Each structure stands twice: as C-alpha cells, then as structure tokens.
Amino acid sequence: MNNQARLDAIFERLAQQYGKLNEKQQAYAIREIGRIRGELADLLADYADSDGNIKRTRINRLMRDLDDIEKQIRKYGTVALDEIIKDSAAWTTTKVNGALNSIVGATVTASTFDRINRDVFRYVVNRYGDDGLVLSDRIWSISADIREEISAVLRSGIIRGEGVSTMIPKVRRVHDNETWKIRRLVQTEGSTAYRTATAYNAERSDVVQWVQINDRPGMHRNHDKHRCFILANEDRYREGPGIFKPTDSEIYSPHPNCTSFITYVLDERWL
Ligand SMILES: [Zn+2]
C-alpha cells in the first residue's frame, strides 16, 4: 500500500468516527433544547388553579409568556450549536493532522490549529445555505415552530378544560415530534464544520494540493440527484472525478443533511 492508499483508509475511518460523534452531538442538542420542558411545566404550574386547571381568560396572557420560552429555546439551541461546530472543527483538525503526521511526518503548529478552528467556526456560522438563511435564522425558525406547536396544544387544551397534568405529556410529544429538525440541523452544521476543517487544514499543508469529495451512497433515496453525488463525479480540473481545490467552498456543504466527506490527494513527492 502506498502512502495515498494508507491515508485514504485512515480518512475513511475518520468519516465513520465523525458520523458517530455527530450522532452524540444530535442527542446533546436535543437534550439541551429539551430543557425548556421543565421551564414550561413551571410556567403552567404558575397559571393553574388549585384544581390544576387554567382559566380560559388567562390564555392570552399565557400565550404572551411563551415569548420567554421561545427565547430560551433559541438560547439553548445557539449555545449547543456553537459548541458542536467548535468541537467538530477541533476534532477534525486534530485527527487529520494526526493522520498526516503518521503517514508523511508533516503537521501544522498548534497556533495554526487554533486559527484554523476559529476560521472554520466563523465560516460555518456565517454561511448562507441554499435557503438564503444563516445558522441563527435556522435556529430562530426551529424555535418559532416549537413555540407554535406548544401554543396550539395549550390553547386547545385549556379551551377543552384539560388540566395541566394532561397537557404536559402533550407538550412533551411536541418536543419529540420536532426533534428531527434538530437532528437535521446538527447533521448539517456539524458535518459542514467537519468538511470545512478538513479543507482548511489542506490549505495550510505543504503536502496536500488537491482534495477529493466522497459522497456516501445508500444513505438516501434519489442519491444520484444529490449535489454531493454530482460533485463527486465532476472532473473539474482534469485531475479526476471529485477532485477540487481546498478553497472550492461549494464542497463544504453540498446540501442539508449531507454526510459526504473530504479526503486529501497527496502531492506526488509524498506518494
Ligand atoms: Zn450528500
């Protein structure tokens, strides 16, 4: 096996490992955002009579108080996503440099590490997706959706005379129903940080001139319509399919929920 094949094998493994890490990050974000359930239960307890019901006349006021709940969702979501992006960048920088070091004995310095990780964070939080939105807009949108669902459950529950103890499990189900949006967000943003960090480290490296995008077929239906599939098969520079410059940012986030990964093409001196 030459150095290129050895490096490819390591990067393949890293992609699997990052997938596992991202699953943990999804669970973490769901847990963090789920903290509002406790706050909501407290809020409902404040509104309830001694018999555990909320009077209809208090609905409007309660609906306004959901502003605070929505703000909390945004806060927990922002803190969690910031941490996930930073952790993904730092994990990637450490791993890809470990790989390069083990194969060709080359690595970048620790101060460069920090700068790369900061640049990745800045890129990911400021990135405009195809939806025309940046990360904070996506968090606002998820928070608004959750609040909307909670409002609907509470409004109809109160009108029907349901007690707080009946409404709380329904509110919990709202959170469960919305978790796929949080999963998708973490998959999208965390993986973008992972791919961006891989590319930024290549840019700073003397031993890598080109990078390659690898799609992961079999994960989705209609995979051949996905942008990652198209990019992985495009031979833009006559260097081979999927081969791009590390600065070609379109390979950092081909589409939402994308699990593609970037590998390095070693300069011929290092083969
Ligand atoms: Zn993809």
Image: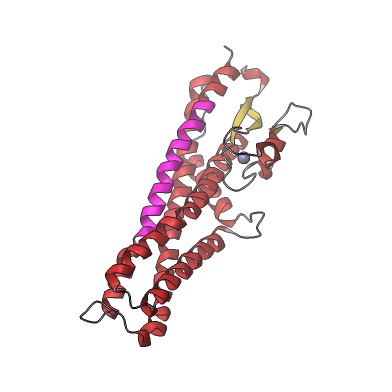
Label tally: 0
Q: Quadrant of residue 192?
A: top right
Q: Between 22 and 165, which is closer to the camera in this rendering?
A: 165
Q: Quadrant of the C terminus?
A: top right
Q: Between 57 and 67, which is closer to the camera in this rendering?
A: 57
Answer left or right for 180 relative to 54: right
Q: Is residue 206 visible?
A: no
Instruction: Write down the region rendered in magenta.
Output: 11-36
Q: Quadrant of residue 232?
A: top right
In the rendered structure, does residue 160 fall within the stretch colored magenta? Answer: no
Picture coordinates of residue 126 (x, y %)?
59, 57
Picture coordinates of residue 181 (x, y %)?
50, 54
Q: Quadrant of residue 70?
A: bottom left
Q: Residue at x 32, y 74 (%)?
A: 162
Picture coordinates of residue 262 (x, y %)?
60, 34
Residue 226, relative to residue 2: is it above or below? below
Picture coordinates of residue 160 (x, y %)?
37, 77
In the rendered structure, does residue 13 fall within the stretch colored magenta? Answer: yes
Question: Is the stretch drawn in magenta largely helix, strand or loop?
Answer: helix
Q: Residue at x 32, y 66 (%)?
A: 168
Q: Residue at x 49, y 40 (%)?
A: 113
